[in-house]
Image (spheres, helix red, strand yellow):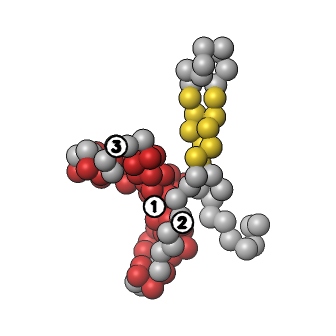
Amino acid sequence: MAEAEHDVDGDGDGEAEVDLVPAPPRRRIEHANLGDCVRLEQTTGLTREAIAEAVEFTYRKLDVIDQQTRDSGARPFVAFVDLPELSSLVSTALGAGLARPLVTPDTV
């Protein structure tokens, strides 16, 4: 699936434009790298699958931003984003990933 870029200015005709840009390849997290999540799940209700989905969601969002900056001729966005701002971007994306409903074979 491609990500969409929304141009609110449009071409002056009052209509917004949407350009589809190719999405970078998806990264998949190795569930074994998450370690033992039993205590985390017991305490917070967050499952290993929910954490993995949130991390993959974060990868997708940051990879799209990075790809778009590179495609425009700019340096990778991490080269011009300060660490506190990058930390905020990552935490916001992780939070958004955790807030999304988990898609499992039972819910499809």
- Residue bearing the label numbered 3: 74
The residue under label 1 is 59
Q: Nearer the viewer, residue 44 or 55?
A: 55
For this rendering, which residue is in front, 7 or 105? 7
The quadrant of the image that shows the N terminus is bottom right
- The number of callouts visible is 3
Could you tell me residue 84's position as x and y percent? 24, 48
The residue indicated by pointer 2 is 26
Label 3 residue SS: loop
Badge 1 amino acid: Tyr
Q: Indicate which label's residue lies in the foreground, 1 or 3.
A: 3
Quarter holding the C terminus?
bottom right
Farthest residue, direction top: 13
**Tag 1: Cα neighbours inside 10 Å, few (<14), some, or many (≥20)?**
many
For residue 102, say whether it is visible.
Answer: yes
The spot of residue 77 in percent (x, y) is: 33, 48
Q: Position of residue 9 (x, y in %)?
A: 55, 20
